[in-house]
Image: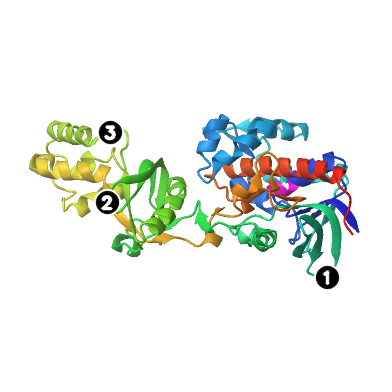
Amino acid sequence: MKYDVIVIGGGPSGLMAAIAAGEQKARVLLIDKGDKLGRKLAISGGGRCNVTNRLPVDEIIKHIPGNGRFLYSAFSEFNNEDIIKFFEKLGIQLKEEDHGRMFPVTDKAQSVVDALLNKLKDLKVHIKTNTPVETIDYDADHVQSVRLKNGESYQTKSVIIAVGGKSVPHTGSTGDGYAWAKKAGHTITELFPTEVPITSDEPFIQKKELQGLSLRDVSLSVLNPKGKVIKTHTMDMIFTHFGISGPAVLRCSQYVVKAMKKFKVNRITMNIDALPNMNEEAIFQYVLKEAKQEPKKALKNLLKSLLPERYLLFLLEKNEIDPLVTSSNLSNESIRAFAKACKQFQFQVNGTLSIDKAFVTGGGVSVKEIHPKEMASKFMDGLYFCGEILDIHGYTGGYNITSALVTGRLAGLNAGKYSQKVKYTV
């Protein structure tokens, strides 16, 4: 059987690509090895589906540290506001939450998936699930056919590879597409986990002293071996039995991976500033003032409004300060040590959880080899890439899905247009 466009992968970018190609009146086949489409979408945003982000384009690009600038051309063709209009046309009303995150008013990811599937049905896109692909066959400089693991083969004018990276493998992202890209001459940049919890073998982690403790709005920094800050994120974090996790940690994780590689070390220092809105002197003066006002009060009670109790006791113990000492017996030296610990609690981390535990894959098909407005291969006519298989990665918060939907839209649109201009090869 012959198809104008074959899309491999039924995640956010693949669904978007199949719809865009179908709108070009192309005969489209969407293939997925799983039993249902949109599995990654269905679990995104905690099951609520953070479909995009409403920040200005420049801000969105800043939140995609992995080759986000490559997307400037794509955003000039189809951007986050266009994504919002696209879903509203499908009957999905969206609402804006903190930091520009956009969710369906239903708070149900499945409503987004269903709207996309209904659109595919309207466009008469052929769908094959439970259908693993063996390879893509190329003829010299153009796409020829897609061969399935069951031995069947479909001739086609164009192929869109939308199979994702290697993170969240239970949704079907197991790195299948890299071999097909290499076969076409593409470079796969080194893969690494991003948006992933960080591991540490520090004694306080191994002893689970802080396990389960959340810190809100702290500044978490990754330091280089000379103690200089590489990156800081101010968000929430949580201590776990293996290290640290939470939004600030996920955003810092890629910088831990990169720093360990760059400096050829097996440990990197991180710093927690638990009171980013106060400097060290301000903390010192605050404690001094409170101590003078209530000289008979135990220190831990005096400071309980500053920090969560478990973290407060932990820092006091680290600095050999008795939490029950009364203010009148508290030395200025102890107050200075405590103020410094609030701003500079440093500890060693030794990496991250593995790529299959990551929310996002770093690395992938080199964007230098992709036409930025079409998502077309520079090496193989009729070959397109979209979504996480590309070497593009952002922070969580709607940035990766925005990248997937934008690149998917352009890949489908241009594959559809291309298929109208060429003939099938024999």
Residue 151: assigned label? 1
Q: Position of residue 392 (x, y in %)?
A: 57, 47
Q: Describe the colour scheme in one phrase.
A: rainbow
Q: Position of residue 352 (x, y in %)?
A: 44, 59
Residue 286 seen from this side: yes
Q: Quadrant of the C terminus?
A: bottom right
Nearest the viewer among 18 and 182 is: 182
Q: Please, is residue 1 above or below residue 341 in the view?
A: below
Residue 226: assigned label? 2
Q: Is residue 300 magenta?
A: no
328 displayed left or right of 278: left
Residue 86: assigned label? none
Residue 278: assigned label? 3
Q: Please, is residue 240 above or below residue 116 in the view?
A: below
Nearest the viewer among 185 and 99 is: 185
Q: Disc 2 versus disc 3: distance between alpha carbons? A: 25 Å
Say few, some or many: other residues with alpha carbon within 10 Å of mark 1 (under 14 / 14 to 19 / 20 or more). few
Residue that appears at 86% across and 43% down: 421
Q: Which image quadrant is residue 304 in?
A: top left
Helix, strand, or loop for circle 1? loop
Residue 50 seen from this side: no
Q: Position of residue 149 (x, y in %)?
A: 78, 69
User: For the residue marked with disc 1, what is the amino acid?
Assistant: Gly
Specify the farthest residue to the front: 140
Q: Tell which circle, 3 or 1, labels the residue nearer the N-terminal end.
A: 1
Nearest the viewer among 296 and 344 is: 344
- Span highlighted in magenta in the image: 12-16
Helix, strand, or loop for circle 3? loop
